[in-house]
Image (cartoon, rainbow, N blue to C red):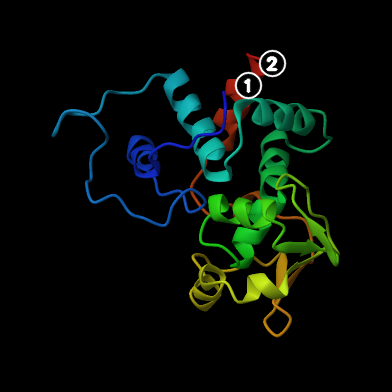
Amino acid sequence: MARYTGPRLKIVRALGIELPGLTRKTPNRDYGPGQHGAKPKRKSGFGIQLMEKQKLRYNYGVSERQMQRLFREAKNDKGQTGAKLLELLERRLDNAVFRTGFAPTVVAARQLVSHRHLRLNGRPVSIASIRVKPGDVISLTEKARRMPLVVETLAAPPLTRPEWLAFDEGKAAATVTRLPEANEVPFPIEVQHVVEYYAVRL
């Protein structure tokens, strides 16, 4: 399954939760897609697991194949699988750029990275899936610092910067101070359902 490029608000309405990495817009309707006023069907155990998994996929903008690869890596780790999976997703470069406040969404952050408007430890990068680690410094190029999108987002960041990123406003750079924790994910997620979803399929 490829990365989703369709209407973002449709996904937000279907999942019934705002995903800051997917879009800044808020649905103007308080019901999901489909016939107006229809009562939502009660979800099965599988439906609940699938919904939680989709929250992660759409917020972080990863494909199903990438999710499966990350789950296998998290499962092989010594710690809790769910917490490790969230850590790996948060450590993606495009997400770190978004959480720093350089871009309004993960989607926009990925575009900044792919167009080489970011530097990692002083070197230009173009791969959004690079995994940041403590000590890494993420900075903007001179051209990017003048881009209207970046200027506007830095003036009004979509989210409060997490504690694992130390921001230097003068240098327009952020330093990764530690690994992100599961409770720092910026939306409600029952990650155990995601673990259960993949446990029987991989």
Percent of width and height locating residue 24: 42, 57
Amino acid type indicated by mark 1: Tyr
Q: Which residue is mark 2?
A: 202
Answer above or below: position of 47 versus 160.
above
Q: Marks 2 and 1, Cα distance to the nearest angstrom? A: 6 Å
The residue positioned 49% from the left and 50% from the top of the image is: 187
Task: State the residue lying farthest toward the bottom.
Answer: 170
**Left or right: where 135 falls relative to 60:** right
Observer able to see residue 190:
no
The residue positioned 52% from the left and 56% from the top of the image is: 105
Place residue 103 in its image quadrant. bottom right
Answer above or below: position of 167 versus 44.
below
**Left or right: where 180 falls relative to 59:** right
Q: Which residue is mark 1?
A: 198
Along the viewing direction, whichever of 59 and 17 lies nearer the viewer: 59
Amino acid type indicated by mark 2: Leu
The residue positioned 74% from the left and 81% from the top of the image is: 171
Mark 2: few/some/many CA within 10 Å (<14, 14-19, 20+): few
The residue positioned 57% from the left and 41% from the top of the image is: 61
Percent of width and height locating residue 56: 55, 39
